[in-house]
Amino acid sequence: MDSESKVQQQQAAYKGVTCPLSLAEPTEDDLKETRSLEEMMKRMNVFESQEGMEQRSTALINLQALACDWIREVAAQKSCPTQALDGIGGKIFAFGSYRLGVNTRGADVDAVLVSTRFIERHEFFDKFFDRLREHPRCGAAHAVSDAFVPVIKMTFMGVDIDLLFAKLDMATIPDNIDLRENTETLLRNLDERCVRSINGCRVTDEILHQVPNPENFRVALKVIRIWAKNRGIYSNAMGFLGGVSWAILLARIAQLYPNAAPNVLIIRFFHVLTRWSWPKPVELCELSPPNLHFPEWDPRTNIKDQFHLMPIITPVYPRQNSTYNVSISTKQVILAELERGRNLTNEIMFKQKSWEDLLEPVNFFDAYRHYVIVIASSDTAELHLDFQGLVESQLRKLVLSFEHNGAIDRAHVNTESYGRANESEPEHVTKWFIGIEFKKAPEPGKKLNVDLTFDITNFIRQINGMANSLQLRLDVLYSKKRGLSHYLPPSEHWKINRSKPACVYGAGNCNQGGAASALAAAAGGAAGASGSSASAPDPAISPMGSAMLMSGSDVPVGSKRPHSPNCFASSSQELQPKRLTAAGGGGAGGGSLTRTDSSSSSLSNVSVKAKT
């Protein structure tokens, strides 16, 4: 057999939808770089210690014992034969970052309770939830039974756990059950919520099964997760990529370079993905669909799937796009960060930069000159937990509406939220910041008229329809960069000290926090970067430096009560939030911002026009 045939035979033995690009073995320098990576992560002290992992394992074992006892009690109440009770039970499977072995210190554990056919979903969220609340080692139990993937959140034996539920059409759950195998038998007679719940575990297990070297994959994935979080692009809910998506991307690179050391996997990760032809999907394997009829991602038959921008497909049936939330703006930011990563890893290869430079946190407040601030506040901590989650889950819809505004080039939501800026604010408050990049005026020296009335009003009405309480408030404000200190905690003020933005994503070359790396223009030039902003007029959203676009302090979510004093007002008159309405006619080109009194008590008659 000649050498070419041997290579072909080796390539055929590896997994993936295509053959590997290289079978090169690690060099001594690669092994040295890998040790350097591992030492760096130890110094960062962000990943769970062995003691912490054992604590999580013990908590899951005890939680499974509690669940099995409860399942047998319910089965006995339903007249299950006594001789069969000992064999009836359930099994808890961990998935996500904990199952992958890359969970950070103190992170919660994602798990699913797989039960027999004797248990109904409503019993899990009612009776078992009550059992948990009565348990002395369980605290902060919170059930979200109407979510897309229903979950019970809790702290059990000191470990934060998100527990899902799935009922299999089985009389018993074998101890050695493999959720990857026998897909048709496993999923038969399940409803879609059970399938979604159990597929988290099946996806995680399949990812580990698809990578040639799981240990090298884990080391590289730890670095990619730190990088994505530090660069503000780790959040499925915000329209970026979640943990599963980043794991699938790196698993695909591991398939293309099956023998590569972790440092090489990271370098190839950036090189391959900056040249990927999106929206070509990223897939780990080909599937033979079973004789079942669950909805799958398939752009050939589903029109909505044709509009997904960065499809990353889960490797189990039913296949789903794990990045369906990605928007035009978030895609631009992700691609720009991948390009930055490629440039830095090139320099790392030539010893011109270090891995610490790659992982340097992004300064979101140094990237834009204009910001929209969404502020959710509640009267109690329990109410705020739900309200905060609701608003956060809907933020991407506000971003999408901004993207459709003809005067806005980019709307970029920060994945990090913030609490109180000072003691005058409500105790239970959460703030999100959206960086806004306006398009250039068609003629130099002229300004665009921007009307955000519909975008803001529609967003607040959506929240109104989902949360109906006088104890909840929602504010949406505008601020230039210099006014952000009134909304950020003092510990964050250093981030806005620069006089001009250092970088706007996709706007050419920039320096982030001193790192001399160039961000390629991922989606065309955008006005407002430090190098181009001088030629564009400074958008004047209002005569004041900070103007309230729409205030839930005027009308609490779900109510029509009169205006109450704005607790977010600043002592600075120039930057004090004001309630604004449009004077004059309606269209994006007419009207100017003026102050009004607080007599209006209905969101429907508040109009906002911002002039840029």
Image (cartoon, rainbow, N blue to C red):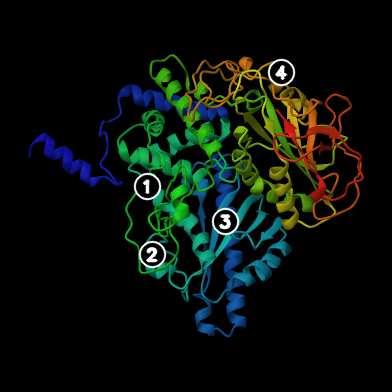
Of callouts 2 and 4, the N-terminal one:
2
Q: What residue is disc 1 on?
A: 283
Residue 102, above or below 206: above
Q: Residue furthest left?
A: 1
Q: Are marks 2 and 4 in contact (CB under 8 Å)?
A: no
As helix, strand or loop, the secondary structure at mark 1 comes to: loop
Q: In the figure, is residue 171 to the left or right of 567? A: left
Rendered image quadrant of residue 36: top left
Q: What residue is disc 2 on?
A: 183
Q: Are marks 4 and 3 in contact (CB under 8 Å)?
A: no
As helix, strand or loop, the secondary structure at mark 2 comes to: helix
Foreground mark, 2 or 4, reads 4
Q: Could you give the CA–CA distance between mark 4 and mark 1, rounded to whole angstroms?
A: 43 Å
Residue 17 disc label: none
Q: What residue is disc 4 on?
A: 497
Instruction: Name the residue type under label 1.
Output: Glu
The percent position of residue 427, horizontal first and vertical second, equals 83, 42
Q: Residue furthest front?
A: 585
Q: Could you give the CA–CA distance between mark 3 and mark 1, rounded to whole angstroms?
A: 31 Å
Instruction: Name the residue type under label 4.
Output: Asn
Q: Are marks 3 and 2 in contact (CB under 8 Å)?
A: no
Q: Residue at x 47, y 19 (%)?
A: 354
Foreground mark, 1 or 2, reads 1
Rendered image quadrant of residue 343: top left
Residue 346, above or below 237: above
Instruction: Name the residue type under label 3.
Output: Leu
The percent position of residue 316, horizontal first and vertical second, equals 40, 56
Of callouts 4 and 3, the N-terminal one:
3
Instruction: Name the residue type under label 2.
Output: Thr
Q: Are marks 4 and 1 in contact (CB under 8 Å)?
A: no
Q: In the figure, is residue 528 to the left or right of 373? A: left
Foreground mark, 3 or 2, reads 2
